[in-house]
Amino acid sequence: MRTYIRHPTSIPIQVCAGGDDASRVRVRNLSAGGLCFVTDQPVKVGTVVEFEIPAIKSDYHGRGVIVWRREQAQKQFEVGVRFTSDDEYFRTRMVEQVCQIEDYRQRLALKGRQLTSEQAAMEWIERYSGDFDQQAQG
């Protein structure tokens, strides 16, 4: 049984696994407990990863451990990461922000305006992150 709700997204992140160079990947889904991404690297279960989500205001940096890996195609792997940070509040706010950005992107698409997740994140942050930050303090 899942502890956290998964939120589909395609926000780009930077992942550094086991001391390797960081690679840019796309998140498939995200929850307060972890994330899933697709990579062309056959990373090992148990590997500690560091990641950065540059689309989020003040670039979210986190750590996690790879808890599962599934081969999707030749040289394409879906990877599950469990966050190792104890800061539940920050992780939850990060997920909420990513969901708000994706909702914003989808609403614009319904109006005929197509943006990448990265473009939507930049716009959303510029327009709404101040209100979002105030909600966190209130």
Image: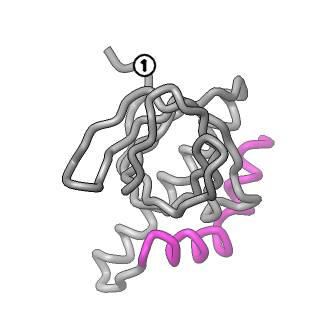
Residue at horizontal 54 percent and vertical 44 percent from the top: 95
Q: Where residue 38 sits in the image (x, y, percent)? A: 37, 52
- Vertical placement of 12 versus 82: above or below? below
Q: Where residue 39 sits in the image (x, y, percent)? A: 39, 54
Q: How many marks?
A: 1
Which quadrant would the C terminus be assigned to in this image? top right
Which quadrant would the N terminus be assigned to in this image? top left
Residue at horizontal 64 percent and vertical 27 percent from the top: 84
| Label 1 secondary element | loop
Q: Is residue 74 left or right of residue 100?
A: left
- The magenta region covers 116-138
Mark 1, residue position: 3
Q: Quadrant of residue 107?
A: bottom left
| Main secondary structure found in the magenta portion | helix
Residue at horizontal 68 percent and vertical 62 percent from the top: 129
**Residue type at the position of mark 1:** Thr
Between residues 69 and 32, which one lies in front from this camera angle? 69
Q: Is residue 109 left or right of residue 10?
A: left
- Vertical placement of 5 versus 110: above or below? above
Q: Where residue 115 sits in the image (x, y, percent)? A: 41, 80
Q: Residue farthest to the right?
A: 137
Specify few, some or many for label 1: CA neighbours under 10 Å numbering under 14, 14-19, or 20 or more: few
